Amino acid sequence: MVDLSYLLISVLIMSGVTFATRLVPFVFFARHRPGPRFRTLQSRLPGTMLVILLAYSLKDTPWADMKTTLITLGSLLLVILLHRWRRNALVSIFVPTLVYMGLGYYLV
Amino acid sequence: MSSTSSSEPLFALRTSIPVFLGYLAIGIAFGLMMAGAGFAPWLAILMSLVIFAGAAQYLAVTLLSAGTGFGSIALLTFLVNARHMAYGISLIQRFAQWPKYRPYLIFALTDETYALMTSLRTPPGLDKGKVHLWMALFDQTWWVLGTTLGVLAGTWLPIPTKGLEFSLVALFGALVTDRWLESKEKDSFWVGIGSVVVAAFVFGVSNLLLPAIGLGIMALLFLPIKEDLDNTEHEHG
């Protein structure tokens, strides 16, 4: 069994480092009056980051497995279509996730 | 409709339900991993309370089991969380409006919370600061709840969780679609797609995250991008 103080100190370090990482921009840019380039970055970054996070959430998909790939892409397409249609995040997430789970259960 | 003081939590709860599914799934997975590695339930729950970072906590299971040194733990946690440094950039002025809530909002700035916050459209009449605070609190509640279920019930709970992880893909898919439909500019999406493709090609699909963020920021700073069709975009919410 691992030593208790080792575990507690490790958890504190991880907590502190994680918070510090999230804090960086708030401290670093606190006194900086944003110029036009920085404002462009601020307004564009969320769109760019969302695309990157979407790609990242798909990184563990076994692309070599044709069935899983089709189910994944099909369910993602369903998310986009449902969202264009209803603009309701709950529907666009619930329904395709159930479809993905169901198809995965029966086909894979 | 006029607002009542209880509307902020209700609106925040509704907004954070998509995260509920995803966090329950990956929280349970984290709890199961901790139980599997032989750690006590309280440790898993404590970690979800004071760290609140999915990838870093997954990594921590391995690090703690191996008795990794403090320096390496700090360095690896930093590397896994480095993407979070990009999130605050778009939220500086927004969070500055609510100094009381700011420390917690920064603490709770996970991938999913950031994504929800940047896509948020608060109905008129609601206190935006309170909506942000409640949303962050609900997100962490789902994370702690998932962790607790996973670590306590472990394998005996008859919840079919296989495939539930797709809810995170669906969450980001819906948020990308929403932002695409909302924003007049499309530069940000093309920059995102380009960064992902280049990063995946050069560094491999599993390592694309940090290089893609780096490329994306460079492109947004240095490419001749049109300013400002929608200067107010980041002040939504």
Image: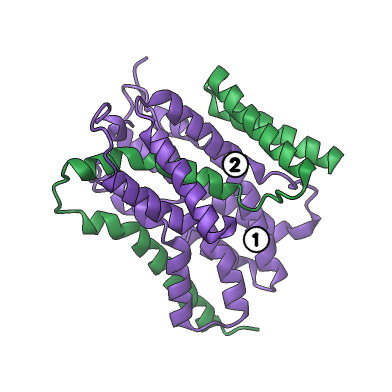
Looking at the picture, which amino acid does disc 2 mark? Val
Q: Is residue A107 left or right of residue A38?
A: right
Dot 1 and dot 2 within a common chain:
yes
The residue located at (74%, 50%) in the rendering is A64
Neighbourhood count class around disc 1 (C-alpha, 10 Å): few under 14, some 14–19, many 20 upward = many
Looking at the picture, which amino acid does disc 1 mark? Gly
Residue linked to disc 2? B169
Residue B138 position within the rendered picture, expressed as x and y whole percent measured from the top left: 49, 43
Res B112 visible: no
Element under disc 1? helix
Label 2: chain? Answer: B
What is the display colour for chain B? Answer: purple
Residue linked to disc 1? B31
- Residue at the far top: name it: B1
Using the image as rendered, state which of residue A43 and residue B167 is in the foreground: A43
The residue located at (77%, 43%) in the rendering is A66
Using the image as rendered, state which of residue A58 and residue B44 is in the foreground: A58
Neighbourhood count class around disc 2 (C-alpha, 10 Å): few under 14, some 14–19, many 20 upward = many
Colouring chosen for the image of the structure: by chain
The residue located at (61%, 47%) in the rendering is A58
Chain appearing in green on the rendered image = A
